[in-house]
Image (cartoon, rainbow, N blue to C red):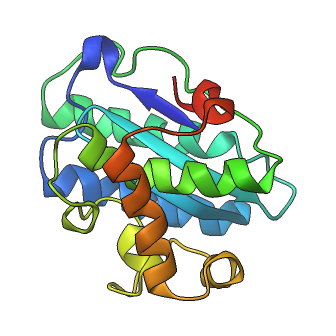
Amino acid sequence: MYNRGRSRLTIFHDHQDYLAVLAKLKEYSNKFSLTLIAYCLMPNHYHFLVRQDGEVAARLLPQCVFNSYSKTYNNRYDHSGTLFEDQYAVELVDKLPCLLHLCRYIHANSVKDGVALQVELWPYSNYLEWISARNGTLIDRAFVRTHFETDADYIEFVTQYTRLRQLPADLQHYVD
């Protein structure tokens, strides 16, 4: 799931904005039995990779989170009109290699877009949880360890992408 600000509008201005969305992510993920596999909040867009564990459709997560956040944003920044460019996009990912590559694409987004020099320097993703550098709750640690035996394995997997800045051709339609 992903979306960006209308006309590339900045949707997160400061730490408080990011924390507001992270709190809503946690609230609705728990309420709807959804698991955030990977996420990254960027100044003008976001990416969520979500697993549906219950009956509530995973596609409802961004709607709930950002309906609430949009009201907060509009009040805080005296903004009116739509905050987002379009309705959020949802893609079903049903192949493990695609899923794993999307995790690293999402986590490396801050480096790819030039807002951080290194993936571990961007605090608004769950990459730090993946590599055991932060003890957050928006993660499925069993999923991580099932696919990456050590933190170093995942660090190297992400580093390969940040060095090459290229995903395999069969994944490009997920991120374009």
The residue lying at 43 percent from left, 61 percent from top is 158
Residue nearer the viewer, 57 or 153: 153
Q: Is residue 152 left or right of residue 148?
A: left
The residue lying at 52 percent from left, 65 percent from top is 27
The residue lying at 34 percent from left, 51 percent from top is 162
> How many labels sit on residues?
0
The residue lying at 69 percent from left, 47 percent from top is 98
**Place of residue 13 in the rendered image (x, y in percent of width and height, measured from the top left):** 13, 41
In this rendering, is residue 68 above or below 169? below
Q: Is residue 162 left or right of residue 59?
A: left
Q: Quadrant of the N terminus?
A: top right
In this rendering, is residue 155 above or below 163? below
**Place of residue 85 in the rendered image (x, y in percent of width and height, measured from the top left):** 40, 15
> Which quadrant holds residue 29?
bottom right
In this rendering, is residue 10 above or below 146? above
Residue nearer the viewer, 10 or 146: 146
Do we see residue 121 in this rendering? yes
> Which quadrant holds residue 125?
bottom left
Residue nearer the viewer, 122 or 162: 162
Do we see residue 41 in this rendering? no
**Place of residue 150 in the rendered image (x, y in percent of width and height, measured from the top left):** 53, 88
Q: Is residue 41 left or right of residue 78?
A: right
**Place of residue 39 in the rendered image (x, y in percent of width and height, measured from the top left):** 47, 55
